[in-house]
Structures are given as C-alpha cells and as structure tokens.
Amino acid sequence: MFLNLGKSFGVSVLEISALKETGIDALIKQIDKCPRKQKKFIYDADVESLISSIEGKLPSNIKHKRFIAVKLIEGDKSVRKYRTDEISHMIKQLRKKYSNDIDFEETMILQKYNFIEGVRKRTASYLPVKESFSDKLDKVFLNKWLAFPIFIVIMFLVYYLSVGVVGNSTVEIIENLVDSFSENVSSWLASVGTSDVLVSLITDGIIAGVGAVLGFVPQLIILFLCIALLETTGYMSRIALLLDRVFRKIGLSGKSLIPFIVGSRVFGSSALWELEL
C-alpha cells in the first residue's frame, strides 16, 4: 500500500505514530530530501492552467505560490492582498466556464476529493462490507429529490408535537392554575388591607406575566427533546450538511439550522404572548 501511495504522489511514504513517537526522525530526514519544486496536479486542465498563470503573476519572493494561487481562485479573504485586477479578471473568466455549476467553490472541493478518491482506489484494498441499515437510511434521507420534502415533513411533525399536541393539552392547564393562584393571592392581599394598585401590580403584572411565559415552557421542552432525538440519530448533522449549500448564500453555515429552529419557536411564542397581553 505504502509503495503504491508513494508512486501516486511521487514521494516516499513512511509509517509514523505521533502517539508512540516512532518514525518521526525518518520523516524529518525524508522531508529534507524531498524535491522542493515537485508538483502534483489535482484539478482539471483549466484550473491547473490558471493556477500556473497566477503563480507567474505573484511576487518572486513569495513562498508556496501554488497554495496562494488556489486560495485566490477559491476567493479566500486571507490572501486578498495578492489579488490584482488582472488576476481577478482571469479568475472571473474561469468561473464563467463553470457557470452551470451550483457553486464554483464546491467544484474545487469536488475535484480535490475526486483526486483523493482516485488515489485511494489505486493504493488501498478493502474487504467487502455489507451495507448497513444506516447506509440504507442515508440513501433515503439524503436523496437528491427526497431530502428536502422529508426534512419539511419531519420539522412539521416536530412542531405539531411540541405546539399542537403538547401545546393544546398544557397551555390551558397552566393558565387555569395561574388564574387560580392569582385569585387566591388577590384575595389574601385584599384581606390584609393591601392597596388596589399593589394588588393589581402583583396579580395582573407579575403573576400574569410569569404565567404567560410558563405556558410555553412545556412546548419548548418537547421541542428540545425532539432536537436531541434528531441529534442522537445523526439526522440533524446530515441535514445540516445538506443545507450548508443554501445557508452559505446568506453568509451562514449548515450548523445555523438549530438556532433557526429554536429561534423561530421562541419568536412565535413571544409573538403569541404579546397578542395575549
């Protein structure tokens, strides 16, 4: 395996263990012997041609020109100081060739992984593994056409369970308990000679306000339990990966899914509270 892997990359491949601290010295010696100008083409011909052209436009005193050129093509802000009008124009022309793709950055990533996958197939061999039940579920839940409809159905069920089933059965109970408690407190305050203003402040202000919030607590508990269940099953991480492409268009990542779910529920709860008040 190591021999084939070395041939694929044109370098020597060594087995090391950072934990056991074995093979480190041999690796350092091999790095010193490694040719400095050796290149391994990863991308397709158009991208590689642009990388070479950008390398020629960069200042001569810069190290790792290929890395900077790739980052410039990917639009990385950390190397924007090297971006000139000429380089920007060259990159824009390349992106036009991939205008049919959903995302050019995704195209670059796919080409990297295609190269890695090709090396893996040439250098590694695996025993046949039976497709697991989880793999079968992934084919359904992450299907190109079914993933989003399934996600919408699951989110509907989560909200229906937390807001519909639990909401209808708990809100009225909590409201009755709060009203009963408010009446008892109001009667007791009146019996000890408390002024009407103070009684109204305590019953209509403090108790009613806290009671309005408590009415939504069971719903939020069920919502968080449902999210925890989705996290445990691994579905949430999968849908976050699936939605990452959509969220990136507004400057977010797929991990923003959970704040969106919780935030929309909290916002809805606060809106209903304001309507009740």
Image (tube, grey):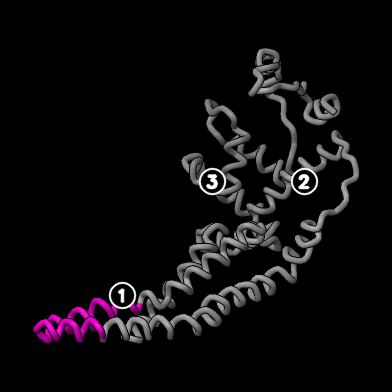
Q: Which residue is mark 3?
A: 76
Circle 3 SS class: loop
Taking the image as shown, residue 99 lies to the left or right of residue 225, namely right
Residue 77 on the magenta span: no
Circle 1 SS class: helix
The quadrant where residue 192 appears: bottom left
The quadrant where residue 207 appears: bottom left
The segment highlighted magenta reads 184-212
Q: Nearer the viewer, residue 88 or 224?
A: 224
Circle 2 SS class: helix
Seen in the picture, residue 70 relative to 39 is either above or below; the reply is: below
Q: Residue at x 85, y 33 (%)?
A: 123
Badge 1 local density, few (<14 within 10 Å), some, or many (20+)? few
Q: Residue at x 29, y 78 (%)?
A: 209
Which part of the image, by quadrant, shows the N terminus? top right
Residue 72 seen anywhere in this rendered image of the structure: yes
Badge 3 local density, few (<14 within 10 Å), some, or many (20+)? few
Q: Nearer the viewer, residue 194 or 3?
A: 194
Q: Residue at x 66, y 59 (%)?
A: 233
Q: Which residue is mark 1?
A: 210
Residue 114 shows which numbered tag? Answer: 2
**Residue type pointed to by label 1:** Val
Residue 51 coordinates in the image, percent (x, y):
66, 40
